[in-house]
Image: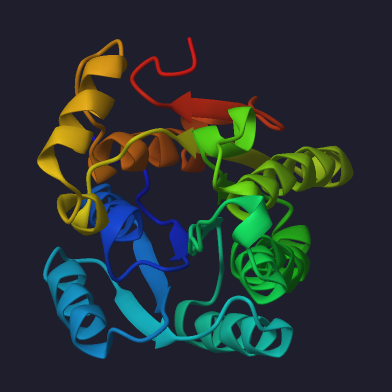
Amino acid sequence: MKLLVGKTAIITGASRGIGKGIAKTFAQQGANVAFTYSSSVEAANELEKELNALGIKAKGYKSNAANFEEAQVLIEHVLEEFEGIDVLINNAGITKDNLLMRMGEEDFDRVIEVNLKSVFNMTKAVQRTMLKQRKGSIINMSSVVGVKGNAGQTNYAASKAGIIGFSKSVALELGSRNIRSNVIAPGFIETEMTAKLDEDTVKSWRSAIPLKRGGTPEDVANVCVFLASDMSAYITGQTINVDGGMLT
């Protein structure tokens, strides 16, 4: 049984990694998918074709979620194309790691803007539609780093912790209108980005995880499916760690 038939989801930053995994899993579960990408036009076109081949409606949009105006325009275009929005997944994110003593102001500001401000922009942009529908599920991608911190990532940790506080507040504001807001905090997820890391580093990370493996984009996507579906109708304001037991 497909869990998301008839639902339309917007996923930011979906041309690769976790975002791409979510888009594919959602399409397999019967959802129509609108997704954004920042620069990888070819990857986005390929993903659009792949998703449409699954018999649902999918469309990629080149849009910068960190820009308030672009987020508003994006939602207008998605509504013209898809008519409604049931699920918003704020997944777009970047890292600019450095020890605090070496971190420039620009690197701090940029990470906050792309990772945290984008969540404000997109949530604000879909809010009116979800209020009219009197339903909706907002899923925000944080990180275990946002829950426990990490040396060399003060900017990233601050942005991801901010997402948790923002999401809890949205859950309190919009709960009475049947709009839910939850957070997923992934641990070490193996993607194209981690494939470039030194094998010994990856092995030591894996051995420190209770389940003894890195996660896959599908591991995160499956929790997104649950939070987007009616199976989680009574869950809001929560943070679910998808980390193989890292934070246990």
Which corner quadrant holds the N terminus? top left
- Residue under the point 65% across and 25% down: 234
The foreground one among 227 and 98 is: 98
- The structure residue drawn at horizontal position 48% and vertical position 9%, both measured from the top left corner, is 248
Q: Which residue is found at the position 69% from the left and 41% from the top?
A: 161
**Residue 116 position in % (x across, y down):** 68, 60
The percent position of residue 89, horizontal first and vertical second, equals 51, 56
The picture places residue 132, in percent across and down from the top left corner, at: 76, 64
Locate residue 165, reporting x and y percent. 78, 41
Instruction: Say above or below: 4 vs 248.
Output: below
> In screen coordinates, is 187 left or right of 30?
right
Camera-side residue: 204 or 163? Answer: 204
Residue 7, compared with residue 15, is above or below; it is above
Q: Residue at x 20, y 50 (%)?
A: 197
Q: Nearer the viewer, residue 82 or 152?
A: 152
Quarter occupied by residue 59 = bottom left
Q: Residue furthest front?
A: 101
78 to the left or right of 115: left
**Scheme of colours in the image:** rainbow
Q: How many marks?
A: 0
